[in-house]
Image (cartoon, grey):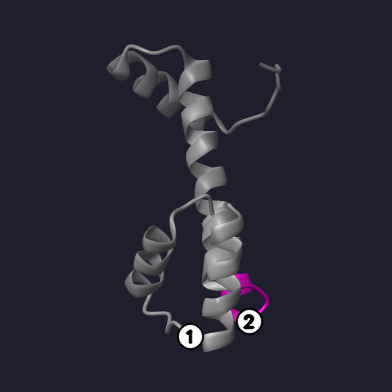
Amino acid sequence: MEVVAARLPKEVARQIERIALEEKLDKSSVIARATDLYIREWRLGKAIRLYEEGRVTALKAASLANRSIWEFLEELEKKKIPTRYSAEEFIEDFEAARKG
């Protein structure tokens, strides 16, 4: 693990302390969990943008978001983002999946 220092607004620091007490965790664990959640959501957002721009296939976007193809497609559905899946993309994704 690497130590990282950050300046936080007082209210955020109070909320971190409250969560740590309630969850019986140290503050570092609370911050690490919150950071993990943010990174996961950021990766999903980036993958969706790339997919919407047509720069990556659904399978590649799912991989970038660190989700299964089914989880990624569910996220698109939740956000009412139309899916596009051409025969070429299917073949590309199928070949990529076969290579492992």
For badge 2, the amino acid type reads Gly
User: Judging from the image, what secondary structure is the residue with disc 1 in?
Assistant: loop
Amino acid marked by disc 1: Arg
Span shown in magenta: 49-56
Which residue is identified by label 2? 54
Residue lying at 71% horizontally and 22% vertically, measured from the top left: 4
Q: Is residue 70 left or right of residue 9?
A: left
Q: Earlier in the sequence, mark 1 or mark 2?
A: 2
At 33% from the left and 70% from the top, the residue drawn is 78
Is 100 one of the magenta-colored residues? no
Residue 8 x, y percent position in the rendering = 60, 31
Helix, strand or loop at label 2? It is loop
Residue 44 visible within the image: yes
Proximity of marks 1 and 2: CB atoms separated by less than 8 Å: yes
Q: CA distance from mark 1 to mark 2?
A: 9 Å
Query: Residue at left 57%, top 33%?
Result: 9
Foreground pick, 83 / 78: 83
Position of residue 90 measured from the top left corner of the image (x, y, whole percent): 52, 78
Looking at the rendered structure, which numbered label has been put on residue 84? 1
**Above or below, 89 relative to 6:** below
As drawn, is 30 to the left or to the right of 22?
A: right
Counting from the top left corner in percent of width and height, residue 54 is at: 63, 81
The answer to whether residue 19 is left or right of residue 54 is left
